[in-house]
Every structure is written in structure tokens, then in C-alpha cells.
Amino acid sequence: MVLDVDKNYLKERQYKSSGNLEARIAIHERFRTNPESFHGWIWDNMELSQPMRVLEVGCGTGQFWTENYKHVDEKSDLTLTDFSEGMIEKIKSKINHSNIKFEVADIEQLPYDDNTFDLVMAHHVIYHSSDKDKAISELKRVTKPGGTISITSNSEKHMLNVYTISHSIDNNYSMVRNIDGFTEEDADKILPKHFSKFDKKIYEDLLKVTDPDFMLEYIKSTTEPRKMDLKESFYDEWAKIVKDEVDEKGFFGILKRSPHFICIK
């Protein structure tokens, strides 16, 4: 089962502010064991000619550019968009360069002319669209011939134990995830319909979480926006599970698998 996309919910609850997304980013940044950061890995995967015109759809808190702006030619032009005004306000407070502009935009109705950008990025965002084929067509439409469309998503198995454990504690915790709307497995089937040429690379990691508080903040970022009716002991039971595994192994482990599709128009 896939969670129905409710854009009002996403704007008004899940991504009205950056807090939920920041809680999820924090656990990845602090406890990753892969020596290469995910965003640095993405940049290194792409062979880009500069200067370039760049569009990012779903820029979130701007973590990609916090890490990678140092690689950008000063003559390049960047347009960073998100459908949440809260996210745009957050990223504007973090990144301030004269060649970057920020706009609110919807991936299914991009307000840009055909063949405008050399690089179009949609990282962990297509699963938030109601019509995946339309979203991908829009990304392709605004890309110049020969340009690059950079797409990331997650495997069905990505961080799956977080959800199975949550559901085992309380079956009111939904196993239906936003990311299941456009997984690696879905992309493998859908992208060949849109691109005759693309490359796929895989980022894998093992999060070794040693702080139960970080784990609980991550869990809350998945439950509170969806207002799940969970039993009173839910978080206490989660904390005990994490503590017990940390006591036994030294960490609570979470497997990650995320593909990067580098598509050429």
C-alpha cells in the first residue's frame, strides 16, 4: 500500500516548518558510518560542465548546497525551489549568494520555459507528487537537450526496521510511508519510459545510533505530523529497545539504501 499524496497535509503539517525534516537529517548526519556524505557522493557522481543553469525542485533545508556550493562556478545560476514556503524561508536563512534565487514551485507544474536548465535536480521529492509520470515529464521538459536530470529516492528496504519495530509496538503506527510512492524499485520501472540514457548508482550506509533521544526525535517526525493515535507507552518502549541494543552491541543499527539516477535528456 502507498500513502495517498495530500499536498495540503505536506504543506500545512509535514513541511510547514523545517523541524520534521531537520530531525530526520540529524540522525543521518550524526550516526552515518559511510565515510562519504550522501550529498557529496551525489555531486561526485555527476560530470558537469560549468558555468551552468541549475534548477533544484524540492530543495528542503538546502543541505545539498551547504556541502556543495563550494564546487559551483561563480558564473553559474541556481534556482532553488520548494512547494513549502517554510522550507524556502529556512534555506534563505542558511545560504546567501548573489547567483542563487529562491522560489515556491510545484514539481507537477514548473513555471519555467522548455529547455531552460543544464542541470535539474529532484532529490527525494518525486514520491511527494500525485502523478509521477507528469512530475518526471516536467523535469525533462525544462532541461536543455543533452542536459542532466538528477533523481534520488530510497529502496523499499531503506530504514525498514524503524517502521516494523514501530508497528510491532503499536499496530496503529502505519507501515505506509511517503517514500513508498517512488522507491528505487518503482524508478527502475518508470524511468526507462522517459529516458533512453541514464546511469544508476547506489549509496548504502549503516546508521549506528547511540543516543535514544535522537532516535525518538526521528520517530516523532514520522508520527506527529500524521497524528497517529499511539498508546501512552509507545516512546518509552522505543527508548528501551534502543537502549537494550546499544547495551548489547554498542549501537542501534539502521540500514540505508538510496539510488541516484543520472538521466540525460
Image (cartoon, helix red, strand yellow):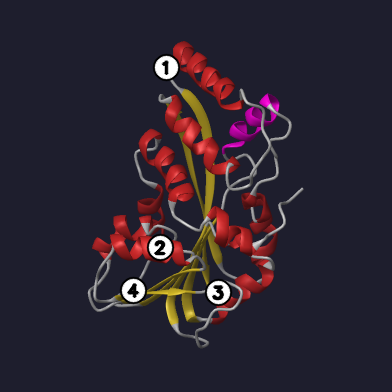
Local packing at callout 1 (Cα closer than 10 Å; few below 14, some 14-19, many 20+) is: few
Separation of residues labelled 4 and 3 (CA atoms): 19 Å
What label does residue 50 carry, if any? none
Q: Which residue is mark 2?
A: 46
Residue 76 picture location, percent across and down: 29, 77
Report helix, strand or loop for mark 4: loop
- Chain-order first, disc 1 or disc 4: 4
Q: Are marks 2 and 3 in contact (CB under 8 Å)?
A: no
- Quarter of the view holding residue 188: bottom right
Q: Nearer the viewer, residue 32 or 237?
A: 237
Report helix, strand or loop for mark 1: loop
Separation of residues labelled 2 and 4 (CA atoms): 10 Å
Horizontal arrangement in the rendering, residue 248 relative to residue 30 (left or right): right
Q: Which residue is mark 4?
A: 49
Residue 184 in sight: yes
Q: Amino acid at mark 1?
A: Gly
- Chain-order first, disc 1 or disc 3: 3
Local packing at callout 4 (Cα closer than 10 Å; few below 14, some 14-19, many 20+) is: few
Q: Which residue is mark 3?
A: 139
Q: Is residue 168 magenta?
A: yes
Q: Amino acid at mark 2?
A: Met
Separation of residues labelled 2 and 1 (CA atoms): 36 Å
Above or below — where is 83 with respect to 230? below
Separation of residues labelled 1 and 3 (CA atoms): 44 Å
